[in-house]
Amino acid sequence: MALKLYNSLARKKEIFEPIHEGRVGMYVCGPTVYSDVHLGNIRTFVSFDVIYRYLKYLGYKVRYVRNITDVGHLEGDADSNAEDKISQRARLEQLEPMEIVQHYMNGFHSMMHRFNTLDPNIEPRATGHIIEQIKMVQDILDNGFAYIENGSVYFDTLKFQQEKKVYGQLSGRIIEELMTETRTDLKNQSEKRHPSDFAIWIKASPTHLMRWESPWSIGFPGWHLECSVMSTKYLGDKFDIHGGGNDLKFPHHENEIAQNIGACGVAPAKYWLHTNMLLMHGKKMSKSDGNSITPHELFTGDSPHVSKGYSPMALRFFMLQAHYRSTLDISDEALSAAEKGYKKLMETNKVLQNLAATQWASTPTSTDTEIEKLMSETINGMNDDFNTAIAIGKLNELSGYIHKLANKQLAFTEISESVLNKLKAFYATFITDVFGLLSESEHAAQEESTLDGLMQLLITMRQKARAEKDWATSDLIRDALGELKIQVKDGKDGTTWSKG
Ligand code: AMP
Ligand code: ZN
């Protein structure tokens, strides 16, 4: 069965045919780094991590681009008098905007590693692509799909719709309704000609912290523009897959399509994939009404919503038990069931890898056929729009055979050696390479080695500071480590560290 995926643009499943044979270009909207990454974001990035892993498993050479939004995402979205989320945070905390960006970007990366997601091949930042964004604004202006108003540049959705007739195709919004719905608002101070127009370049107010020179004003780019620019810069005017959470369909992705067509006449992606939302107690997880839990609270169990802590791997398994297009409801019971499911799967794999015999079936058996069938059904599940829920179900059915062989309820003479070897490789590859699940001890070892690497770096920096008699820096490092209960000892064989 060929790989099919649900294309939000076509509103149906389609057979995946990459633009260039054997290669896949995939762009996923990354986080806006002005606060800690939340579990909803993590669900979306874990879903695309499995999609990335599975495409690689199928043998595609994948270029995975996931951006960092470090400018342009406005509070409350669309209007030019709203404040940029990062600028606002920087002003409130009296920090440089780039300090805010660095802090939350580091936190995002380390959280992604705890969930064992693979790094994207390119992780472009919006502030690193201002020149390209100015160029795209100019292209859109030159093509007549934007207008300048008091130093800001707005995309002219009405003109675009009249000429191209595609605005609203992705989200199902009807532009005529968008217009009539809010027509009365036009009297407001808004500089937009039409309520559905959106800013692609925003003139900075005198207090705005992030600002760049442009032909129109000293200002900053609109949020939607960065993804139009960075996706096509690294993947070409037309690439294979564009992804994000389904809350981004409108206006973000709808506007991205309009900008790309407005600038170069081509819609950016062939397939649009959207993940569904993470819920808690049946409602969208939200910080403001207390219906929320942070990853750290989940790891430690320090929350009224859970009875105990859950590891990142149990959480990852919990996410994979649902298809990415279904909502996923987090609850203590569901997490506890997922933890058991995760442990069982890892244990079964261990049992399988240790199975050994001296006598095997000499001719193909019905067990061989059943096992082969279940393996291909696992693949079929993934080929059906990356349905991890089905694939996990099939691996669980296979585990029935594995335990029967281990318990001698099924004799090794009922199975061919080649089929068991195939099953061993298949099971391990699926768990580790496709699902990205590690056993808890492997995961802990991986985290330990990262920590060790970081500690060696700090020890070197401290030694350098001491050699240069920079006592302030060396004391700062020692005290900060002390607060984390990490002791550094200088001995005759060098410096060692311990935790406790
Ligand atoms: P943001 O940092 O808000 O730009 O979001 C980063 C990614 O997380 C986007 O693809 C969002 O669609 C996605 N996202 C945000 N909230 C949730 C949620 N509750 N469940 C799943 N994905 C989400
Ligand atoms: Zn985006």
Image: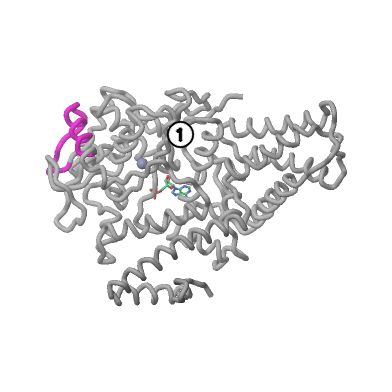
**Quarter holding the N terminus?**
top right
Residue at x 28%, y 74% (from the top left corner): 470
Query: Which residue position holds label 1?
Result: 62
Q: In the rendered image, is residue 291 in sight?
A: no
Judging depth in this view, the residue of 301 and 352 nearest the camera is: 352
**Relative side of 150 to 360, left or right:** left
Give the image's coloring scheme. one colour
**Relative side of 339 to 169, left or right:** right
Judging depth in this view, the residue of 207 and 128 nearest the camera is: 128
Give the secondary structure at mark 1.
Answer: strand
The residues colored magenta run 133-152
Q: Give percent across and percent down for residue 458.
A: 39, 66
Q: Give percent across and percent down for residue 393.
A: 68, 40
Q: Place residue 391 in its image quadrant.
A: top right
Q: Give percent across and percent down for residue 8.
A: 46, 32
Which residue is farthest front?
Answer: 492
Q: In the rendered image, is residue 490 in sight?
A: yes
Residue at x 54%, y 66% (from the top left corner): 303
Q: Which quadrant of the picture is home to ligand 2?
A: top left
**Relative side of 337 to 405, left or right:** left
